[in-house]
Image (cartoon, rainbow, N blue to C red):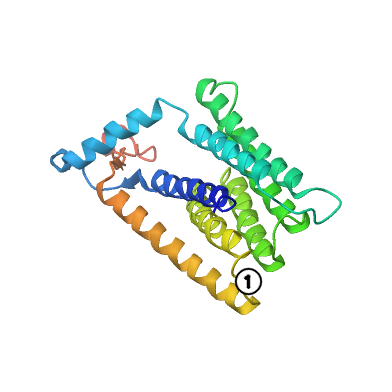
Amino acid sequence: MDSSLPCILTGFIFYAFGLKWCYEYAKYWISLRARDDSNSTKGLRFMEKCERLINRHPIEGSLKLIATAIGLAGTITGGLQQVGTVSPKVVLATIYLFFAFSGLVDVLNFYFPHNVSEGLVKLALAQSFFIEGFLFLWGSVGSNAIVDKILALIVWTTAISIILELVWPELKLLRACTTLIHGSWVAHMVRVYNTVPMLGEGIALVFTWHVAAASAVTLSVVSATRSCAPKLIMEEPPEIPIYDYCQEPNQRM
């Protein structure tokens, strides 16, 4: 149980990131309908108070630093066996340090937004996910090649979607969904494979259920958030009369 606790906690934190990004994607949406202030419910006012409280602190960067501390503690105290020329502890510590760097950039962006832009935050986060997939694929840190390849595919998809968010913000929904899969995969398959070995077809079946669960959670969070989130009202532009230059003033009268 001691060796499984870091995987469970790390997976839980990634899952929390996925839920947070689902909420952030859906909390504002554009409506062409007229504003109706009578729909301001107690639940909406409570959400607005919670959001103001969260916005006063660098929550995302703090969670990354906490996940790094948990992961490093589990790596140092865990009994990982030497597989290749480089110790798995060194590989895992490198992964966690990249996420610590991403968390540090988040904190700097929160306190110094003029100096550290949102693009740098996304770049650091995408870099962290890419390094995680890269080292899980070639770093000999996992106990099964198929499990590690699926994890690398998940985190590389997340990294690509974060980079493309710089030009297509809608991809934040893909980032949220793949992060949910990432968290559940780490907490479940990366944790249990040492004790319950499975064949390739079993792993593939489990992966499909992880995808289905992440899709269901994404759909539920986005639908629930948009049902009570404030709408960005887009007023129709006023009609501007076109001046007729082809006729004389007396003819237009």
Rendered-image quadrant of the N terminus: bottom right
Closer to us: 45 or 168: 45
Q: Position of residue 202 (x, y in %)?
A: 58, 77
Q: Residue at x 56, y 46 (%)?
A: 165
Local crowd size for mark 1, using a 10 Å CA cut-off: few (<14), some (14–19), many (≥20): few
Q: Nearer the viewer, residue 37 or 13?
A: 13
Q: Give the percent coordinates (x, y) of residue 208.
A: 52, 71
Residue at the image point whose x is 62% and y is 46% from the top: 163
Closest to the observer, 245 or 235: 235
Drawn side of residue 35 relative to residue 66, left or right: left
The picture places residue 181, in percent across and down from the top left corner, at 52, 59
Report x, y in % for residue 47.
27, 38
Per the image, label 1 sits on a secondary structure element best described as loop
- Left of 103 or right of it: where is 243? left
Label 1 amino acid? Answer: Pro
Q: Is residue 86 left or right of residue 244?
A: right
The C terminus lies in quadrant: top left
Q: Quadrant of residue 235?
A: top left
User: Looking at the image, can residue 167 be seen?
Assistant: yes
Q: Residue furthest left?
A: 38
Q: How many marks?
A: 1
In the rendered image, the vertical position of residue 102 relative to residue 7, given as above or below: above
Q: In which image quadrant can residue 104 be found?
A: top right
Residue designated by label 1 = 197
Residue 40 in sight here: no
